């Protein structure tokens, strides 16, 4: 994916739309990627997560048409996709267009009357970086189509659930609700504490500048091809562990229950989920009190649990985290589904350069491609931009 970051995305899609379709768009909408601060693989176990929206977004210019077709073009793709709204069924459109088709299909499945439309997309969430580019795409299209359809519902969490339904049932990726909820619900300057069991959310103020901190996001540029299979395997292991414990989901299990698991692998998988849920709750409290030392310790412990119990990290991610920790990070961990992607580190502002240089040096020493290292602020969720 190319990142045309020199040009404002709203201007970029507005002019590209006009060039392609011959008139200005009716509107422009966008939705962000996310980093998850803590709470990994807990969402599909009905647990707790704590993501924030990143500044990278997918932006879409769109206009309703009279036909029954979605015409979709993208700044990052050479081919235009045409989606026949009357012939949608799971998997009928493959590749990137499948996420757009999936959202139209999911909205229709929930009773919405989706109109024909012309769309022009600009996706600036890097692909394969563990920053949730697919949810950003789904949610940008979802907010645009709902408004073009003249609907006031679904909005908020129900709209995130529509986007998740598209991903689960149309695209066929059995992911949890975190990424879509983050993309729709996050607000600037806050982390989102989300309880998936009760579908309750809390916006926790996350004032990095006020605390003298920076959030480093380090994209290792590694994305392992077996990641989807491993993700599904972890999900199944969690379901088996919950069944063995006689609970609906691991959210309802406690550390004391773990002794009853006789399969050593299921024990490790379940231990990650049960302890991670406790860590997210504790992290929410620590952030609320501005106790950054405690928050950072929980990040470090989360990483160890992902590495040793859930076994979803990889060498490049572990080295990134270890180097950040060795260079004075407040806390560091992998973010996202795993097997590559990005690590995050909470770092005193004056340490950012030293941590970044040390990570780059560690990668160079090992002959690995350089990671992309940035700092990010908690940003706004999905919405209309023009
Ligand atoms: C991916 C999934 F899409 C999320 O639902 C979540 O499970 C995450 O991996 C791991 O926490 O981003």
Image (cartoon, rainbow, N blue to C red):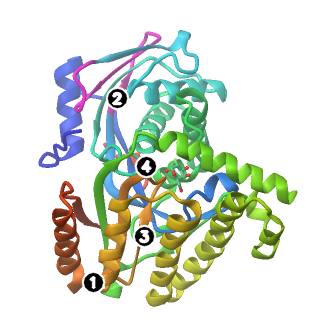
Q: Earlier in the sequence, mark 1 or mark 3?
A: 1
Report, in whole angstroms, how far the alpha carbon at label 3 lies from the one at label 2.
38 Å
Does residue 56 appear left or right of residue 134 in this picture? left
Percent across and percent down for residue 174 are 60, 39
| Residues under numbered marks 1 and 4 in contact, where contact means CB atoms less than 8 Å apart | no
Percent across and percent down for residue 44 are 65, 51
Q: Going 50% across and 40% down the picture, which residue do you hit?
A: 228
Q: Secondary structure at mark 1?
A: loop
Report, in whole angstroms, how far the alpha carbon at label 4 lies from the one at label 3.
26 Å
Query: Where are the magenta residues, as a range?
Result: 61-79
Q: Earlier in the sequence, mark 2 or mark 1?
A: 2
- Of tags 3 and 2, which is closer to the observer? 3
- Of tags 2 and 1, which is closer to the observer? 1
Q: Is residue 134 above or below residue 244?
A: above
Does residue 196 appear left or right of residue 325 in this picture? right
Residue 195, by quadrant, is: bottom right
Report, in whole angstroms, how far the alpha carbon at label 2 lies from the one at label 4.
15 Å
Q: Residues within 10 Å of mark 3 (few under 14, many from 20)?
A: many
Does residue 113 appear left or right of residue 132 in this picture? right
Instruction: Point out which mark residue 333 bears.
Output: 3
Can you identify the residue that label 1 sits on?
327
């Amino acid at each position: 994916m190319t990142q045309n970051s020199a040009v404002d995305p709203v201007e970029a899609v507005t002019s590209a739309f006009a060039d392609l379709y011959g008139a200005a768009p009716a509107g422009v909408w966008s939705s962000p990627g996310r980093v998850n601060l803590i709470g990994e693989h807990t969402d599909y176990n009905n647990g707790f997560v704590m993501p924030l929206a990143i500044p990278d977004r997918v932006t879409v210019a769109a206009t309703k048409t009279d036909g029954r077709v979605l015409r979709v073009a993208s700044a990052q793709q050479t081919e235009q996709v045409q989606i026949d709204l009357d012939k949608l069924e799971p998997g009928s459109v493959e590749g990137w267009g499948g996420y757009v088709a999936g959202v139209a299909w999911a909205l229709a499945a929930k009773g919405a009357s989706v109109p024909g439309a012309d769309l022009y997309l600009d996706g600036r969430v890097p692909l394969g970086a563990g920053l949730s580019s697919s949810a950003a795409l789904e949610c940008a299209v979802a907010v645009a189509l709902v408004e073009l359809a003249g609907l006031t519902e679904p909005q908020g969490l129900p709209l995130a659930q529509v986007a998740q339904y598209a991903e689960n049932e149309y695209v066929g990726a059995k992911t949890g609700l975190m990424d879509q909820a983050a993309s729709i619900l996050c607000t600037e300057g806050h982390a989102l504490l989300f309880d998936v069991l009760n579908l309750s959310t809390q916006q926790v103020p996350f004032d990095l500048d006020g605390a003298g901190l920076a959030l480093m996001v380090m994209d290792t540029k590694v994305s392992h091809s077996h990641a989807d299979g491993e993700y599904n395997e972890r999900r199944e292991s969690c379901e088996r562990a919950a069944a063995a414990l006689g609970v609906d989901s691991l959210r309802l299990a406690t550390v004391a229950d773990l002794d009853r698991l006789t399969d050593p692998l299921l024990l490790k998988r379940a231990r990650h989920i049960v302890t991670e849920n406790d860590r997210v709750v504790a992290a929410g409290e620590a952030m609320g009190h501005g106790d950054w030392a405690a928050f950072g310790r929980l990040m470090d412990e989360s990483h160890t649990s992902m590495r040793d119990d859930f076994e979803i990290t990889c060498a490049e991610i572990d080295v990134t985290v270890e180097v950040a920790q060795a260079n004075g990070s407040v806390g560091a961990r992998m973010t996202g589904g795993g097997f590559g992607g990005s690590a995050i580190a909470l770092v005193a502002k004056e340490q950012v350069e030293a941590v970044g240089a040390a990570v780059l040096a560690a990668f160079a020493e090992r002959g690995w491609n350089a990671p992309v290292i940035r700092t990010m602020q908690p940003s706004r969720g999905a919405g209309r931009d023009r």
